[in-house]
Image (cartoon, helix red, strand yellow):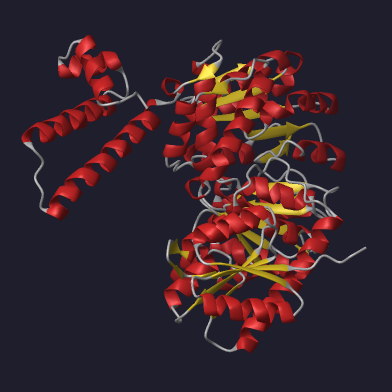
C-alpha cells in the first residue's frame, strides 16, 4: 500500500518566501502548496487535506491570527504554525492560546522552521495513529467547534492515565459531563463514579462524609460508615467545587491523594484506597492559592492535568447542535412530537450571550417547548422574555453605536428628514425592547394605534426578534 | 426552592422519621410528597416546564424499589438528587451511584447528616 505523502500549505503574500518554503519542503519529501491571501488559503484548505498550515500574520485580506480556527476546523484538522516577519510577544500569546503548534519568525533560521515542521509531523503521525485505535465515547458531549474538540482531546488523553485532572469553567458549561466521560473511557469504567458536591458539605461533616467514621466517633455515629473516598476505591472520585473544601480538610485529603490511604474519623486503622481524582471548579484556584484560601501543594497535586471548558458564547457554532439535541431529548422524555426551530428562533439563540451557559440554554429550550405545546415550530415569542429583551437591546446598541459614532467620526450631520427617520427607528426598537416584544404593552406605552405601530415596524423592517 | 420527597405508599411508616425530619427542618419551603412511581414521573416531567429549583429525595426501602428508578433514569438526569438506601452493601451503593446523587445515606431513625447537607444545598444555587 502506497504511503500517503504529507501535505503542507503555506499562506503568505510574500511570493519569494512561498517559493523558498515550497522548494525546501519538497526537498524534505512533502507535497507543498502556497496561497497569497487568506481567501485563497481557506479555499485551498477546503478542497484538499493538508497536514500542516504555515500561516502568515499580516495578509492583504486580514490577520492570520483571526483565521486560525477556520483553518483548524477543516476536515483534515491540520496543525497550524504561525509565521511572522517580526517577533510579537502579544501575538505569540494569542497564537498559543488558540492552541497552534508553533509560532516562528519566517526570516529566522531555516533549521528552526524545518525542526518545527518535523515535530508537527511527528505529533500528527502519533495523533492519527491513536485515533485509529479506539474512539473516545463522548456520551452527551455535543459540539463540533474547535474549542470543544480540543477539550475532548484533552479528556481522551486524561482517560488513558490515572493522573489527577482539574476541570475548570463557568457554571453550566458541563464540567460534570466531562468528568463522567473521562471515567467512562478509563480503565476504571466498570467501577464506581462517586460525585462529591463539596459546596453541599457543612464544615463539621466534611471529614466524616469523605473519610468515613467508626461507631461512636461522635454523638450521631451509631455505626461504622464508609466515606466517599473508600466507596470510590478502584473507581473515580469526582470532587465538584473543590474550591469549597475547608482548609482543615485539604491537608488530610492531600495525604490521602499522595499515599492512597485514609483513616476514618475515630479509627486507629488506616485503609488502603486506590481512587482516581477528577476535580472541578468555577473558581480561580490560583487566585485562591495566592490569598491563602487553598493549599498550593494540593492545587499542584489535583491539577496535574488541567482542562478548561469554554463558555457557550465562545463556542457559538455548537448552539444549533446543542439545541437540536435538547429538543429531541425533551420530546422523547415527554412523549411528544419534536418541535422544529424557525430561522428567527435560531437567530435569537445565536444572538444571546448565555451567561448561564448550556444549563441556561437547555432551561430556555424546555420553557420554549412547553410554551409551544401542540405547535410544530418554535418562534422567538416562545422564548423567555429576558432573552428577547437582551437581544433587542443589543440590536439597538449596535445600530446606535454604528450611526452616531459614524456621524461624530466624520463630522457629518444627516439631513433633518433622515435624522427624524433614524430617531423613529430607534424609538420603535427601544419601545419593543422595553415591552419585551409584547405588542399590547407597546401600544399602551406609546399611545400608538396598532395599525400605526405595525406600519412603522414594516417601514423600518423591525420584527419582534 | 421545592423539595420533592418520594416515600412509596407501602413504606409510609418506615419513612415517617424521614418525613418528620424534612418537615421539621424545612417546613418553610415548598415540600411535595409523592407516593407512587407514576406521581414521581409526572413531577419530574413537570420540572422541565418550571424554572423552580428542586431537590429530589428518594426514600428507597429495598433493592427492588431502587432498581425501579432505572425506568426513570433519564428524568432523574441532571437533577439534584439525594437517595436513602436500604443497606450499605457494595451492590446497593453501586446501583445508587449510577444515578449520580449529590448525597446518599441509609435508612435510620435520625437523619441529622442528611438534613445538615440539605440545609447547605438549599442555601446554594446549582453549580457545575
Q: Residue at the location (56% across, 61% down)?
A: A41
Specify the quadrant that holds the N terminus of chain A. bottom right
From this viewpoint, which residue is outermost toward the left?
A: A416
**A395 with respect to B27 (left or right):** left
Q: Is residue A213 visible to the viewer in this orientation of the structure? A: no
Instruction: Please identify the quarter of the rendering in which residue A4 is found.
Output: bottom right
* Front in this rendered view, residue B13 or A357: A357
Q: Is residue B81 visible to the viewer in this orientation of the structure? A: yes
Instruction: Please identify the quarter of the rendering in which residue A344 is found.
Output: top left
Task: Give percent across and percent down for residue A397.
Answer: 26, 41
Q: Residue at the location (44% across, 25% down)?
A: A383
Instruction: Please identify the quarter of the rendering in which residue A158 is found.
Output: bottom right
Task: Give percent across and percent down for residue A461.
Answer: 30, 26
User: Where is B128 relative to B115, above or below?
Assistant: below
* Front in this rendered view, residue A156 or A211: A156
**Count of picture labels:** 0
* Front in this rendered view, residue B91 or A18: A18
**A29 with respect to A92 (left or right):** right
Specify the quadrant that holds the C terminus of chain A. top left
User: Where is A269 relative to A311, above or below?
Assistant: below
Task: Give percent across and percent down for residue A130.
Answer: 81, 61
User: Where is B8 relative to A39, above or below?
Assistant: above
* Front in this rendered view, residue A165 or A10: A10
**A324 with respect to B67 (left or right):** left
Task: Give percent across and percent down for residue A406.
Answer: 19, 49
Amino acid at each position: 500500500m502506497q504511503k500517503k505523502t504529507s501535505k503542507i500549505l503555506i499562506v503568505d503574500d510574500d511570493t519569494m518566501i512561498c517559493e523558498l518554503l515550497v522548494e525546501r519542503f519538497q526537498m524534505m519529501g512533502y507535497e507543498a502548496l502556497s496561497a497569497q491571501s487568506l481567501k485563497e488559503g481557506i479555499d485551498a484548505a477546503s478542497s484538499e487535506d493538508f497536514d500542516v498550515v504555515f500561516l502568515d500574520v499580516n495578509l492583504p485580506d486580514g490577520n492570520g491570527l483571526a483565521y486560525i480556527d477556520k483553518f483548524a476546523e477543516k476536515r483534515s484538522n491540520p496543525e497550524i504554525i504561525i509565521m511572522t516577519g517580526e517577533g510579537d510577544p502579544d501575538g505569540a500569546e494569542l497564537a498559543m492560546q488558540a492552541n497552534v503548534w508553533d509560532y516562528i519568525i519566517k526570516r529566522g533560521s531555516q533549521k528552526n522552521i524545518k525542526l518545527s515542521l518535523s515535530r508537527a509531523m511527528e505529533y500528527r503521525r502519533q495523533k492519527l495513529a491513536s485515533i485509529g485505535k479506539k474512539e473516545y465515547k463522548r456520551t452527551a458531549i455535543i459540539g463540533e467547534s474547535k474549542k470543544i474538540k480540543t477539550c475532548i482531546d484533552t479528556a481522551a488523553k486524561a482517560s488513558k492515565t490515572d493522573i489527577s485532572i482539574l476541570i475548570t469553567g463557568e457554571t453550566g458549561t458541563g464540567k460534570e459531563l466531562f468528568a463522567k466521560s473521562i471515567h467512562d473511557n478509563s480503565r476504571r469504567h466498570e467501577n464506581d463514579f462517586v460525585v462529591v458536591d463539596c459546596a453541599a458539605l457543612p464544615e463539621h461533616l466534611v471529614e466524616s462524609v469523605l473519610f468515613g467514621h467508626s461507631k461512636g466517633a461522635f454523638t450521631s455515629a451509631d455505626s461504622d460508615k464508609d466515606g466517599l473516598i473508600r466507596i470510590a476505591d478502584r473507581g473515580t472520585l469526582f470532587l465538584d467545587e473543590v474550591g469549597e473544601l475547608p482548609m482543615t480538610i485539604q491537608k488530610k485529603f492531600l495525604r490521602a491523594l499522595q499515599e492512597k490511604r485514609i483513616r476514618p474519623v475515630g479509627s486507629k486503622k488506616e485503609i488502603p484506597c486506590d481512587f482516581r481524582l477528577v476535580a472541578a471548579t468555577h473558581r480561580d484556584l490560583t487566585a485562591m492559592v495566592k490569598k491563602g484560601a487553598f493549599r498550593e501543594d494540593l492545587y499542584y497535586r489535583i491539577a496535574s492535568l488541567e482542562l478548561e471548558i469554554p463558555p457557550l458564547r465562545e463556542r457559538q457554532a455548537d448552539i444549533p447542535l446543542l439545541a437540536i439535541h435538547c429538543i429531541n431529548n425533551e420530546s422523547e422524555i415527554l412523549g411528544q412530537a419534536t418541535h422544529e426551530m424557525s430561522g428567527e428562533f435560531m437567530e435569537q439563540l445565536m444572538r444571546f450571550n448565555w451567561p448561564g451557559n448550556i444549563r441556561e440554554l437547555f432551561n430556555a429550550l424546555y420553557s420554549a417547548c412547553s410554551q409551544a405545546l401542540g405547535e410544530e415550530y418554535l418562534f422567538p415569542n416562545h422564548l423567555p422574555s429576558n432573552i428577547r429583551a437582551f437581544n433587542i437591546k443589543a440590536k439597538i446598541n449596535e445600530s446606535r453605536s454604528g450611526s452616531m459614532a459614524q456621524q461624530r467620526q466624520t463630522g457629518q450631520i444627516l439631513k433633518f428628514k433622515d435624522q427624524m427617520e433614524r430617531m423613529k427607528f430607534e424609538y420603535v426598537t427601544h419601545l419593543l425592547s422595553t415591552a419585551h416584544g409584547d405588542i399590547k404593552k407597546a401600544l399602551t406605552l406609546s399611545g400608538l394605534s396598532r395599525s400605526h405601530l405595525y406600519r412603522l415596524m414594516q417601514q423600518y423592517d423591525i420584527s419582534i426578534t | 426552592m421545592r423539595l420533592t420527597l418520594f416515600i412509596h405508599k407501602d413504606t409510609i411508616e418506615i419513612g415517617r422519621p424521614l418525613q418528620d425530619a424534612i418537615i421539621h427542618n424545612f417546613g418553610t419551603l415548598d415540600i411535595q410528597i409523592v407516593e407512587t412511581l407514576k406521581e414521581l414521573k409526572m413531577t419530574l416531567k413537570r420540572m422541565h416546564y418550571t424554572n423552580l429549583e428542586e431537590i429530589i429525595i428518594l426514600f428507597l426501602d429495598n433493592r427492588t424499589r431502587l432498581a425501579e428508578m432505572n425506568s426513570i433514569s433519564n428524568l432523574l438526569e441532571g437533577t439534584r438528587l439525594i437517595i436513602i438506601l436500604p443497606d450499605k452493601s457494595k451492590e446497593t451503593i453501586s446501583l445508587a451511584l449510577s444515578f449520580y446523587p449529590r448525597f446518599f445515606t441509609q435508612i435510620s431513625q435520625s437523619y441529622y447528616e442528611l438534613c445538615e447537607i440539605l440545609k447547605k444545598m438549599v442555601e446554594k444555587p446549582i453549580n457545575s
